[in-house]
Amino acid sequence: MHNYNNALRGGLVGAALLTLAGCTGPLFGPGGFDNATLENGAPPELVSRFREADSDGNGVIDPTEASAAGLQGLFTTLDEDRDRQISEAEFINGMQQLDNNQ
C-alpha cells in the first residue's frame, strides 16, 4: 500500500508540473492563470489596449506608462487599490465602468 501511495503522489505531482509548464509567466502575473481567466471574459480591445500601455510587459501600468499611453487623467480612477499601479483587472473593470457611465 505504501508503494502505491508514493506512486500515486508522484503521478499527481508530475501531472501538476506538466499543467504548470504551459504557463508563460508566474501563476499570478503576465501569462498566468489570472490573466487567462480575465481574458476569456474581457473585451479583446481592452486587453490589447492594456498590453500596449504596459510597455515593459510586467503586468501593470505605472504612472510613466500611463502618461505615455495618454491615460494620466484616468490613472487615479483606474488604480482602485491605490498602489500606484494599474493591474489588468483594474484597467478592464475601470474602462468598462467608464464606458457604462457615458
Image (spheres, helix red, strand yellow):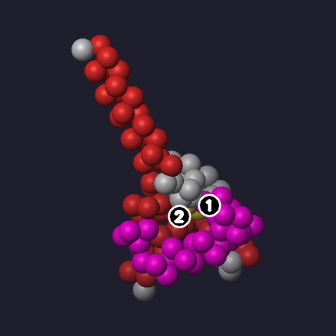
* Drawn side of residue 41 relative to residue 62, left or right: left
* Drawn side of residue 2 relative to residue 13, left or right: left
- 83 shown above or below 43: above
- Secondary element under disc 2, as helix, strand or loop, is helix
Q: Nearer the viewer, residue 72 or 28?
A: 28
* Drawn side of residue 67 relative to residue 92, left or right: right
**Residue 66 image-quadrant placement:** bottom right
Which image quarter is the C terminus in? bottom left
Report the magenta stretch's main SS.
helix
Which residue is found at the position 51% from the left and 54% from the top? 23
Labelled pair 1, 2 in contact (Cβ < 8 Å)? yes
Q: Is residue 97 magenta?
A: no
Is residue 16 visible in the rendered image? The answer is: yes
Is residue 98 visible in the rendered image? The answer is: no
Q: Position of residue 22 (x, y in %)?
A: 49, 54
Q: Position of residue 101 (x, y in %)?
A: 40, 81
- Secondary element under disc 1, as helix, strand or loop, is strand
Q: Amino acid at mark 1?
A: Val
Q: Residues within 10 Å of mark 2 (few under 14, many from 20)?
A: many
- 19 shown above or below 52: above
Residue at the limit of the structure toward the left, as seen here:
1
Residue placed under numbered mark 2 in the picture: 88
- 88 shown above or below 73: above
Which image quarter is the N terminus in? top left
Q: Amino acid at mark 2?
A: Glu
Q: Position of residue 90 (x, y in %)?
A: 50, 63
From which residue to which does the magenta span run? 39-66
Which residue is found at the position 35% from the left and 21% from the top? 6
Residue placed under numbered mark 1 in the picture: 60
Q: Residues within 10 Å of mark 1 (few under 14, many from 20)?
A: many
